[in-house]
Amino acid sequence: MSLMNWSGKRIVVTGAASGIGLRTAELLMENGATVIALDRNTPPMDVSRYIHVDLGDRDSIDRTLEGIEGGPIHGLCNIAGVPGTAGDEAVSRINYIGLKRLTGLILPNIEKGGAIVNLCSTAGNRWPDRAGLLWDLAQIQDWDEATAWIEAHPVMLEDSYSKFKEALVVWTKSVASELFMRHGVRINSVCPGPVETPIFDDFVGSFGRRNLDDIVERTGRIATPDDVAHPVLFLLSDLSRWIVGVDLAVEGGLRASRLASVILQGDALGGARD
């Protein structure tokens, strides 16, 4: 499977009605893929098949399997998501619990050599601070059990958008080796900063205005869906066949800039002490 030739490949894209999901679906269609679009809203373009799904609704997720029958799946792009303004319950279900359930249902249909790409966020960069806790959550497969676990750990609802992006990074890493070795399926994640999408204003609360201003100062601009969709396709393609369990930063050098600032500030303080 080459990056630019998807002829004969069936790819499932969630969140395909807008933003990064829409641009990903467009690029795939332009290069020959059969795109099965999953979203609560109808995509504004002709896709191979559209399936209405609400990732916050277990029954809605389970019904999607009826729509993807008819051949093997070669890739899954988990791009659908909601901002923190949607509320803690919606964030936990749509951005994490529902995403995991959908992936588990589709996995048996993904052909060996296929790939899964999850959309994470720089808002989840602090996952190492809670790696053990999030690893415990990652081991839970049952919907109700996961919901109960989250209720018992209120820290997950403190800035829930960031916490469940952290959880998604950890879950991706926790299953990557097994999926690759047992099923021949790669799973990775893409980690963008803020992106100019129809719900960008809703994400301002998750990132914070001061943080957004700092991002623009360090990178020059806010990302576009096109900036993120191409790396998604790269991780979906055979060009990344030896990349497994990676969280790919797609943020215009933001982390590098911040690290440089920390080091330079440290050197300046050290010089002042000397």
Image (cartoon, rainbow, N blue to C red):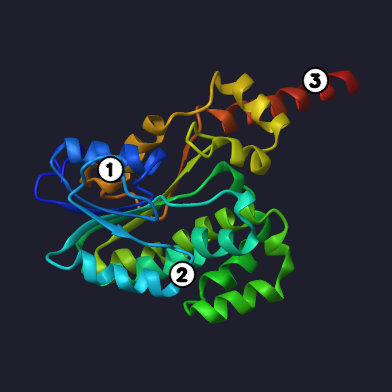
Q: Quadrant of the C terminus?
A: top right
In the displayed structure image, the side of residue 18 where residue 28 appears, left or right: left
Distance (Cα) linking label 2 and label 3: 53 Å
Which label sits in the foreground, 1 or 3?
1
- Write the residue at 25% across / 49% down: 241
Q: Position of residue 80 (x, y in %)?
A: 43, 52
Tell me if residue 115 comes above or below residue 249 in the rendering.
Answer: below
Q: Which residue is mark 2?
A: 57
Which one is in front, 118 or 258? 118
Residue at the left extreme, as displayed: 8
Residue 25's disc number? 1
- Return the disc, 1 or 3, that comes first in the chain's sequence: 1
Left or right relative to 210: residue 274 = right
Instruction: Indicate the position of residue 86 as horizontal and vertical percent values.
Output: 60, 53
Q: What residue lies at 35% left-to-right and 74% top-to-bottom?
A: 62
Q: Secondary structure at mark 1?
A: helix
Q: Are marks 1 and 3 in contact (CB under 8 Å)?
A: no
- Badge 3 is on which residue? 268
Residue 203 is at least partly visible in this image: yes
